[in-house]
Image (cartoon, rainbow, N blue to C red):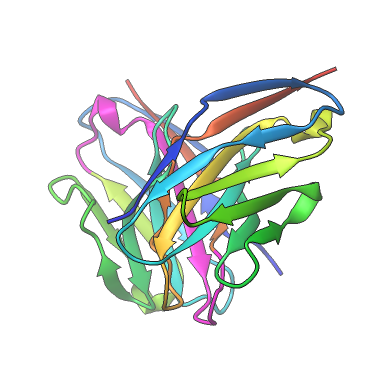
Amino acid sequence: AQSVTQLDSQVPVFEEAPVELRCNYSSSVSVYLFWYVQYPNQGLQLLLKYLSGSTLVKGINGFEAEFNKSQTSFHLRKPSVHISDTAEYFCAVTKSGGSNYKLTFGKGTLLTVNP
Amino acid sequence: EAGVAQSPRYKIIEKRQSVAFWCNPISGHATLYWYQQILGQGPKLLIQFQNNGVVDDSQLPKDRFSAERLKGVDSTLKIQPAKLEDSAVYLCASSSDRGSSPLHFGNGTRLTVT
């Protein structure tokens, strides 16, 4: 089975500052990794995903994440955040292979961007 | 394309009552998921359908929860009887069978059990 640990439950930052949201995973098999964002009273929206290939993955809204197999991490970064980035961010993992994902989510990180 | 549709958006019931949620996935998506998201936690998979067959329901509390996906399209999730700890957001998601297809989520149904 896979598991995900999001190391920070809340991350407050100022607008235009860089941000990193940390995610570590545990798995005995190869994995796919995802970051989702959830705005208030909405469902989850895919930010980016790592399936294979380049370990640096670029997503929507200027976010990127780097897969580090040796450290079993998949941290999310953005060089300059906006007020509109305020939301809950979830890291998720599933075993690789196949086309139907049984995602295991972390508990989420609430990113608050202050003016 | 139209997104995943869920209804109702909000539901308040008393414990021991029953409730049902409805989900219509994106057209053509063969796989449908129901997730439970308790406040302060990440979503937890309850059940996964492939067309109208169940792929995984290992975390579905079958003594009170049931789900069906007739005709392989829309789906209903039912709770009977509800408990206080069932208060959560119930998210439906769908994906196609193409390789590497991500999950698309609906806006969820927020259930409050009093």
Q: Position of residue B87 (x, y in %)?
A: 35, 30
- The foreground one among B81 and B86 is B86
Q: Position of residue A60 (x, y in %)?
A: 76, 54
* Magenta-span inclusion, residue B87: yes
Position of A53 with respect to B65 (left or right) is right
Question: In the displayed structure, would residue A12 be above or below residue B7?
Answer: above
Can the viewer see residue B24? Answer: no
Question: In the displayed structure, would residue B20 be above or below residue A8?
Answer: below
Rendered image quadrant of residue A111 = top right
- The foreground one among B74 and B42 is B42
Rendered image quadrant of residue B58 = bottom left
Q: Which residue is drawn at 75% across and 35% down?
A: A85
Q: Where is residue A27 in the image (x, y as percent from the top left)?
A: 33, 56
Q: Which residue is drawn at 59% across and 75% down?
A: B27
Rendered image quadrant of residue A10 = top right
Q: Give the range drawn in magenta.
A: B80-102
